[in-house]
Amino acid sequence: MAVYTDITEGALRGFLEAYDIGRLTAYKGIAEGVENSNFLLHTTEGPFILTLYEKRVNAADLPFFLGLMEHLAARGLSCPLPLKRRDGALLGELAGRPAAIITFLEGIWLRQPETIHCAELGRTLAALHRAGEGFSLTRPNALSVGGWRPLWARARDRADEIAPGLRDGIDRELAFLEQCWPDGLPAGIIHADLFPDNVFFIGDALTGLIDFYFACNDFLAYDVAICLNAWCFDDKTGIYNGDKGRAFLAAYQAERPLDERERAALPLLARGSALRFFLTRAYDWLTTPAGALVVKKDPLEYWRKLRFHQTIEDARGYGLEI
Amino acid sequence: MAVYTDITEGALRGFLEAYDIGRLTAYKGIAEGVENSNFLLHTTEGPFILTLYEKRVNAADLPFFLGLMEHLAARGLSCPLPLKRRDGALLGELAGRPAAIITFLEGIWLRQPETIHCAELGRTLAALHRAGEGFSLTRPNALSVGGWRPLWARARDRADEIAPGLRDGIDRELAFLEQCWPDGLPAGIIHADLFPDNVFFIGDALTGLIDFYFACNDFLAYDVAICLNAWCFDDKTGIYNGDKGRAFLAAYQAERPLDERERAALPLLARGSALRFFLTRAYDWLTTPAGALVVKKDPLEYWRKLRFHQTIEDARGYGLEI
């Protein structure tokens, strides 16, 4: 939630000359997106989003991300469409950073999604997985099983500062997952970060998905597992909500049925994705200065979710109907 | 530059039911305004700004601020207009805070204003001072001469951490200003914080003023002095720019000529307003934690400006033509 880089009107005017988007009438930094600086532009043609890619994003990945949005939008998924410059490029440079303009998507992200929204999410996640087929670029998932041990190495020594016993608990879980992680499941483009703040609604209708900057190639069911973690636990109690899980999974399966191996792997994938968010949060938790204005996300939320998944023996425990 | 409070879609929907502004299609926290939380709303009727007033704003002052914007807009000044709720009130409550919706003003604030913009500013500042006449509420200026000593008491003991010798320098300046501060100058509504981020332009034309949350009753020429400090020094070199000062003052005087006493007092008012911004910045500088993501504004910028004003013997030194 931050604007890291401000831009001068002169630099912005120069940047916009490469585009056909009318005359600029307003621009404001917006408090969305953790990795990049985002501005809402108003021009005589309408609203747009300008993104400046900060250091945490690898510039070599940008053609993948922008090309993917173009591919998905062309296949009917509602997501931001990168604007082409007059020279045909999707990417320019502003304030020393790679920068792109994308269409503005109307809609609201839900701070408190309900069961009906989980169903919308399931339907749209399956649509995303279908729409990703045929995309020509690939990007490995640096935050899947092979990436966890190096992440853990950055937090392990101080993990018991977060909660006593955490170091041993994660050591065991990581060793287990490295040994049992499935292979050969159906794979393709996944969003990999489909939390509520990346899904827009108007009323109860899902209007679009944003923020494809973790998208990559991996098991499609890993994306399903991420959504179970991100959408189907009650915020206040931390308890898994079977209604939400059932609605989400049924809507997903109506568009793209999970095969037998995916169903069998679901508890393991849910453990793995809980571990993935635990690990990045634990690192941020231990390294963010106490006075900083960023909201520190609690890593223990994901440790608790992980322990819940350890108790699930098969996917029916999530409300999956077979 | 911060969103301090987030709001849920349910709370926002409930809040909006009191207004006739169409259907909500998007809302985003925007990185503008230091004291409050601001959201850009899109509805089927257009864009609006929603402001939640945080603790630094005294709720008892809100009727003054909102009423003032209404008064100024009715008298032709381009500024945000607070929307009336169905019950006629300008103020409601959201997330436990007083909250208001104001119209969205198109325009861009200039990170690098030039001479032509200073002229536009002068003309509009005079128009603001005229438009403020007849406003029925009053609010004393807590950040004029009577307020400086208590502010200084919060920073004085540690002032030499900012720069050696600062404590004695400010002690002397404060004693001098307390003794010589003018009285009986023409007074009325002043903006009191008309920095470039509160003045919008499209191209070179000024399109409006925002952020009236420091507005109060004081000498009109104090507002002129604040603008000299905020607009007429070159950012990079810190040197006073005579062209900007001349353009600003000439345009102001074309609409509202300064009288003889105001002209004579201008160097003193400029010292006082430089001290005022020095003092709030010094306090923030000394109390903001090192790791915080807020941009700490350099108090020494205003100490240097103050020392420049100490060298000015009469208002012609600013480019004022008599």
Image (cartoon, coloured by chain):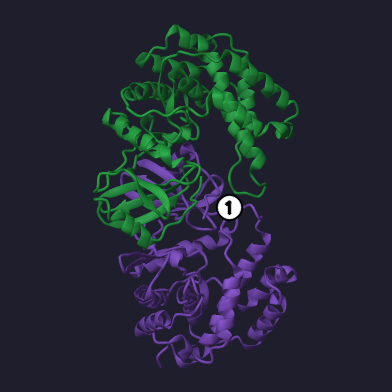
Chain colours: A green, B purple
Q: Left or right: where does residue A47 sit relative to residue A246?
A: left
Q: Which chain is mark 1 on?
A: B
For the residue pair A125 and A132, the one nearer the viewer reads as: A132
Q: Which residue is at the far front?
A: A60
Task: Name the residue type under label 1.
Answer: Leu
- Which of the 4 image quarters holds residue A278? top right
Residue at 49 percent of width and 18 percent of height: A245
Q: Left or right: where does residue A20 sit relative to residue B144?
A: left
Residue at 38 percent of width and 49 percent of height: A40
- Which of the 4 image quarters holds residue B198? bottom left
Residue B86 shows in this picture: no
Return the x and y of residue A211 as percentages of the image width and height: 42, 36
Return the x and y of residue B300 as percentages of the image width and height: 60, 72
Q: Residues within 10 Å of mark 1 (few under 14, many from 20)?
A: some
Whether B255 is drawn above or below A114: the answer is below
For the residue pair B114 and A118, the one nearer the viewer reads as: B114
Q: Which residue is mark 1?
A: B293
Return the x and y of residue A123 as percentages of the image width and height: 37, 21
Return the x and y of residue A78 as percentages of the image width and height: 32, 32
For the residue pair B240 and B145, the one nearer the viewer reads as: B240
Give the position of the C terminus of chain A as an image quadrant. top left
Residue A124 shows in this picture: yes
Whether B104 is drawn above or below A259: the answer is below
Q: Left or right: where does residue B95 sit relative to residue B117?
A: right
